[in-house]
Image (spheres, rainbow, N blue to C red):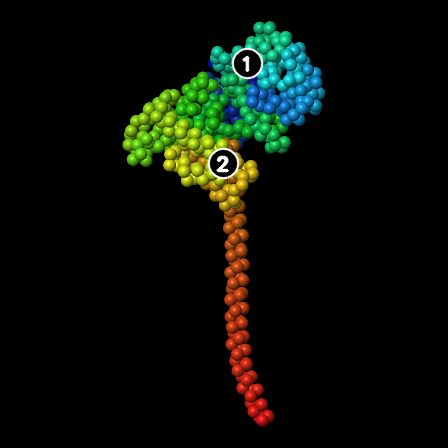
Amino acid sequence: MICPKRTSELLDLHLAPFKDKDPAWEVGVSKIAGRGVMATRNLKRGEIIFQDSPLLIGLAAHEEDTLNACSVCFKMLPDTRFMCRQGCGLPVCSLCAKKKQHKTDCDMFKAWGSNEPDVANSVIIRLLCVARAINLSKDQRDLIYCLQANLDNNHRTEVRNAAKCFKNFPTDKKIVEIMNRTVAVLRTNGFDKTTDRTTDNQEFNYRALYPLFAVMNHDCIPNSYYTFEEKTNNMIVRAAVDIAEGEEITTTYTKLFTGNIARHLFLKMKKGFTCKCPRCLDPTEKGSFISGLYCRDTNCSGLVVPEITGLPHPNWNCLVCKQKSTHAQMMKSQDFASGAINAKVNSNSLRTLVHYLNEKSDSFIPSSNYVVIDAKLSVLGRLAQGREDCNEELVSSTRLRYCRDITQIMDKLGLGDSVLRTQLEQQLHKEEERRAKKQKELAEKQRQLDELEQKAAEADKLLATLAVADQAVGGAGDGAAATPAAEQT
Ligand SMILES: C[S@@+](CC[C@H](N)C(=O)[O-])C[C@H]1O[C@@H](n2cnc3c(N)ncnc32)[C@H](O)[C@@H]1O
């Protein structure tokens, strides 16, 4: 393990513009693994713990991505003429083309000589984040070297493949080693993520290295969560729950709603470790039954969970009738359910999907299963876009029901705050407010109706009285008229 003190010194230099005078964190020896980030005082849920800025950042440029995003500001560019006119092989906007960052990138890639400088090549564009490490200061580079790098067999492939795209790719061992090391550090600690920018409403994929975040260990129920500052791409880490002084601040490297086995496989294959957090050690995942399936015995309504956690192919056990099933048997049920639900998710009609989730899927997959949760999240996402052809009542009831279902599962898991929880709570709040407002309007309409009815009843009553009076007067009149007439005759 690299000394936490040296890591702290280098992090202090990197974070100098943002670091509090009295930071709420320090790098220390972790009980989970190697170094970790520790709380230096009690932290309240929601409190900012630290701000981290990217030491390296660049476009993710996956093969399937559109490549017309600026390599400096990441803004999407028009489909044509987005490549640098200097022939470096990088996409850049006209504003950023004049910036120092691009000049450095451009000089480096021009010297390497892209084979096809006018064609956007995902391998070249993706390499930029890695290649930027070459031009960092010594302290910054030391910080990269200070971070954990899982040196698996594949970490050299990226640079090797990129080398084929240039005529004069560096052969200097030191430079190639910096790039290979950076790839390994990025793979162990980096971010490869999609972001939706709210201001320009554009989505872009980037890869980045946030060095303080890179020292945070994983827990499947993390006690912190992060958001990004749009302008700077800085990361803001907040407490997801109250955290006591001395406690380790953890994050999650996986999606919150992945089942035990999928999380285990991802962490083992991609991050090289086996998680032993309480959620991972509990086959029911804290009673949330996220991976739970129905018993194969049609006469039993029990839930089936893995017998032992931490295995890629465990046997499964029914919690009611105790029948054992093999992993292959249970995966058949899971695959069938996933296939059926995902087919509906990918079909065009939201109404069909909602009907299926509300009325049909419960007969073959428990509503706690991650496939159902994912499908409900997809429905909520589509409703948020507001483009679906659904009536108001369906939108409202679905939103309320799914937000409640998902927050309930989060509560069972013991998950504190997160970006997702905030979004769900906002949607719930908005929907509840809308419903309350509608009910108030309905009550007001009812009151007005009652008032009108009352007035109408009063008017009827009055009319009836008048009619009676009229009749009485009419009757008396007839008599009165008769008399004088009689008198006249
Ligand atoms: C981003 S680094 C975290 C910081 C790391 N502990 C260090 O000393 O630099 C990720 C690596 O930390 C280790 N790690 C993180 N969380 C872990 C956990 N829950 N259990 C075991 N190892 C973990 C794994 O080796 C993983 O590849």
Q: Mark on residue 387?
A: none
Residue at 57% over, 28% down:
195
Q: Is mark 2 within 8 Å of ligand 1?
A: no
Residue 447 x, y percent position in the rendering: 52, 58
Q: In the rendered image, which residue does mark 1 sit on? A: 158
Residue 202 x, y percent position in the rendering: 61, 30
Residue type (three-letter) at the residue carrying disc 2: Val
Instruction: Name the one closer to the observer, 4 or 320.
Output: 320
The local secondary structure at tag 2 comes to helix
State which tag comes first along the sequence, 1 or 2.
1
- Looking at the figure, which quarter contains the C terminus? bottom right
Packing grade of label 2 (10 A; few <14, some 14-19, many >=20) is many
Q: Is residue 51 visible?
A: no
Marks 1/2: CA distance? 37 Å
Packing grade of label 1 (10 A; few <14, some 14-19, many >=20) is some
Instruction: Name the one closer to the observer, 340 or 440.
Output: 340
Residue 395 x, y percent position in the rendering: 51, 42
Q: Residue furthest top?
A: 172
The local secondary structure at tag 1 comes to helix
- Which quadrant holds residue 268? top left
| Horizontal side of residue 313 vs 353, given as left or right | left
Residue type (three-letter) at the residue carrying disc 1: Glu
Q: In the rendered image, which residue does mark 2 sit on? A: 379
Residue at 63% over, 21% down:
71
Q: Is residue 290 above or below residue 462?
A: above
Residue at 35% over, 32% down:
294
